[in-house]
Image (cartoon, rainbow, N blue to C red):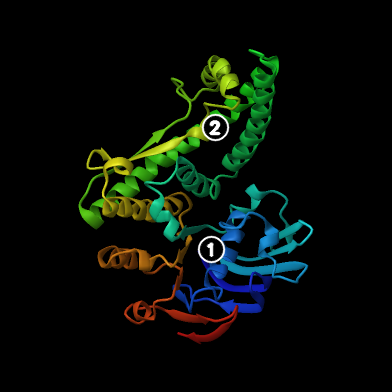
């Protein structure tokens, strides 16, 4: 899978720009605050339907403009695709693939697969559980539209349940029939989500542990830590578990159990990396997990995703940098960097010099 061209109009600090990419490595370089990361962000939107750093689409529209328009030409082993996204200041958004309107996010995410590496990913091991859930969700959602649909339906029901729990807490009530209604919906969708997540963790553990051994010779293990302590992932078992926690959830005025509290336990050489791992072990584990994310997509889909590396090389020491360079060889990669010495010392296919939201020079 690779991208051949990207066009941006009124996106972030880009007025109008078309960029042609090599199917292999592309280095997007320049000083800070010139628009390098904005290019990766725009590609990410075509895969996930949203930005990885903006809270709303309005932030993506160039100041003083009423809309932003993006188009992307990309290809897999079976066919060519042309995607177009238009974001209007009033909040409306139009997405088309090969001129066909996309009405659901789950429909979009099955086309272009990407894996984003950013400095924040180095916090994957020692960061919050929500960052590890996002890691799972961004991987599985790209391949299984049903997973994303279940995730969306689950969170809609969770919002309703939390609202009810707050009302019950305020009234001093001990129960309500509607809690069981929401628990039934959460159990049905939660069972599906857990099954997908368990299978993902099983695969990602195998890929990441092998990568960790190759980088450092250490033993990495990733375990699924469900937020539902049911004996099985059967919806009836989950429902009963949710029901048993009604009193406690009313007391806290929020849902205390469920897949929204899932986490991963990451251990290196038998000890929990988040608590006992050195910074080097934590970073190696995080890098192993991100590379494994790409291997997971390749395993399921038969094609490697496009790799987006946002200033990640500067975060790595020479050994990890060399390992990553070997792993990405032969795949399409978009790398941002301010380190021209790093660029010159590495064999890249194409260089794109960015200044003030424009490509001012192309080499390769």
Residue drawn at point x = 29 percent, y = 64 percent: 323
Does residue 295 appear in the picture of this structure?
Answer: no
104 to the left or right of 239:
right
**Residue at 70% across / 60% down in the picture?**
58
Could you say which is closer to the camera, residue 215 or residue 267?
Answer: 267
Give neighbour class at mark 2: few <14, some 14-19, many 20+ (Cα, 10 Å): some
Q: Is residue 210 above or below residue 240?
A: below
Q: Are marks 2 and 1 in contact (CB under 8 Å)?
A: no
Q: Residues within 10 Å of mark 1 (few under 14, many from 20)?
A: some
User: Which of the 4 quarters of the picture holds residue 249?
Assistant: top right
Pick the residue in front: 236 or 343. Answer: 343
Count of numbered tags: 2
Can you tell which mark lies on residue 76? Answer: 1
The residue closer to the viewer here, 22 or 67, is 67
* Rendered location of residue 41, percent (x, y): 57, 64
Of marks 2 and 1, the one in the foreground:
2
| Residue at 42%, 60% in the rendered image | 119
Residue at the far top in the pictured view: 174
- Per the model, the C-alpha gap separating discs 2 and 1 is 29 Å
Q: Give the left or right position of residue 261, taking residue 60 as reference.
A: left
Sequence-wise, the earlier of marks 2 and 1 is: 1
Residue 296 pos. (x, y %): 42, 50
Q: Quadrant of the C terminus?
A: bottom left
Secondary structure of the residue carrying tag 2 is: helix
SS type, badge 1: loop
Q: Is any atom of residue 52 visible in this view?
A: yes
Image coordinates for residue 271, horizontal then vertical, percent: 25, 39
Q: Mark 2 — residue?
A: 192
Mark number displayed over residue 177: none
Coordinates of residue 61 in the picture (x, y in percent):
70, 66
Q: Residue at x 20, y 52 (%)?
A: 217
């Amino acid at each position: 899978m690779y991208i051949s061209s990207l066009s941006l109009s009124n996106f972030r600090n880009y007025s109008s720009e078309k960029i042609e990419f090599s199917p292999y490595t592309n280095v997007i370089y320049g000083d800070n605050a010139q628009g390098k990361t904005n290019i990766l962000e725009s590609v990410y939107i075509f895969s996930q339907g949203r930005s990885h750093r903006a809270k709303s689409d309005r932030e993506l529209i160039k100041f003083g403009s009423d809309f932003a328009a993006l188009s992307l030409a990309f290809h897999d082993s079976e066919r060519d695709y042309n995607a177009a996204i238009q974001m209007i200041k009033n909040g409306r958004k139009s997405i088309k693939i090969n001129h066909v309107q996309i009405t659901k996010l789950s429909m979009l995410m099955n086309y272009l697969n990407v894996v984003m590496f950013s400095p924040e990913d180095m916090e994957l091991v020692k960061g919050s559980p929500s960052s590890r859930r996002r890691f799972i969700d961004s991987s599985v959602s790209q391949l299984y539209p049903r997973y994303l649909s279940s995730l969306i339906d689950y969170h809609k029901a969770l919002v309703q349940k939390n609202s009810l729990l707050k009302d019950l807490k305020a009234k001093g009530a001990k129960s309500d029939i509607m809690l069981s209604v929401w628990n039934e919906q959460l159990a049905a969708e939660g069972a599906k989500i857990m099954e997908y997540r368990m299978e993902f963790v099983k695969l990602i553990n195998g890929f990441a542990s092998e990568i960790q051994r190759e980088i450092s010779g250490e033993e990495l293990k990733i375990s699924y830590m469900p937020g539902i302590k049911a004996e099985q992932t059967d919806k009836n078992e989950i429902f009963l578990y949710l029901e048993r926690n009604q009193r406690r959830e009313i007391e806290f005025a929020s849902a205390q159990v469920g897949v929204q509290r899932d986490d991963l336990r990451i251990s290196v050489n038998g000890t929990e990396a988040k608590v006992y791992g050195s910074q080097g072990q934590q970073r190696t584990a995080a890098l192993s997990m991100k590379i494994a994310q790409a291997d997971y997509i390749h395993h399921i889909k038969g094609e490697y995703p496009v790799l987006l590396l946002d200033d990640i090389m500067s975060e790595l020491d020479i050994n990890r940098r060399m390992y990553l360079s070997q792993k990405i060889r032969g795949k399409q990669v978009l790398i941002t960097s301010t380190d021209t010495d790093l660029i010159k010392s590495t064999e890249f296919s194409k260089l794109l010099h960015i200044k003030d939201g424009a490509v001012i020079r192309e080499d390769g």
